[in-house]
Amino acid sequence: MKKSRPRPLDFVIDKLTNSIENTSTGEVFDTEVVRLTIKDVNQIKKADWQFDWTKEIKDKTKEVYKLTTVNNPTIIQGLLSIEDKQDHIFMHLIESAKFNKHKVKVYLGIPGNLVAYACKVSVDKGYQGFLAFDAKTALIKHYQETLYATHFRGLRMFIETNAALRLISQYFKS
């Protein structure tokens, strides 16, 4: 089977919060990131998501995670697909729920939370927080400024240890 090339990511870091923050009230909600399983697919309506998350779950080389609030674990706020490359984590896809995109969104902090989680997985696996991903050209500078990511070459970017630890400490207190 032909391996597809990673697609450039185009998520926007709206705000680095310490969890997720309601845009109208400023209230902060504790979050949980857990592995998405094939049983959870019924929670994902294709019309509400840009990417085919069922395909991601079925790909055995990838791990898919969902971000929810602790008080409402049935509503998915965002999704993340990563792959263990044995010395770093590669982020394939990241997406906020439809209601957390564009100008009128319910919560801020979804993408930052998911990127921080990917960095945490890297640390937990002994990869010192190294996370790689491909970015759309127009967003390279944005990721350098918001995530402290480094542009490697072409579309490839990475987050190294100090930047990863900074993001992890922002979102994960324990």
Image (spheres, grey):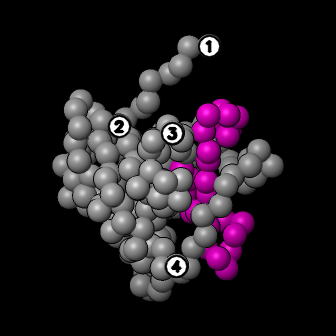
Residue 56 forms part of the magenta stretch: yes
Rate crowding at label 4 as few (under 14), some (14 to 19) or many (20 or more) other CA atoms within 10 Å. few
Q: Is 90 rendered above or below residue 1?
A: below
Image spot of residue 22 (x, y percent): 47, 78
Q: Is residue 16 above or below residue 83?
A: below
Callout 2: helix, strand or loop?
strand
Residue at position x 47%, y 58% in the image: 123
Mark found first going from the N terminus, 1 or 3: 1
Q: Residues within 10 Å of mark 2 (few under 14, many from 20)?
A: many
As measured in the structure, the alpha-carbon distance from the residue carrying label 2 to the one carrying label 4 is: 29 Å
- The residue that label 3 is drawn on is 86
Find disc 1 in the rendering and name its residue.
1
Which is in the foreground here, disc 2 or disc 4? 4
Q: Position of residue 49 (x, y in %)?
A: 57, 46
Discs 1/4, front: 4
Of residues 80 and 28, the one drawn nearer to the viewer in this rendering:
80
Residue 32: which disc? none
Q: In front: 94, or 83? A: 83
- Type of the residue with mark 1: Met
Q: Nearer the viewer, mark 1 or mark 3?
A: 3
Q: 156 or 38: nearer the eye?
A: 156
Amino acid found under the numbered disc labelled 4? Ser
Helix, strand or loop at disc 1?
Answer: loop
Whether 161 is among the magenta residues is no
Amino acid type at image mark 2: Asp
Rendered-image quadrant of the N terminus: top right
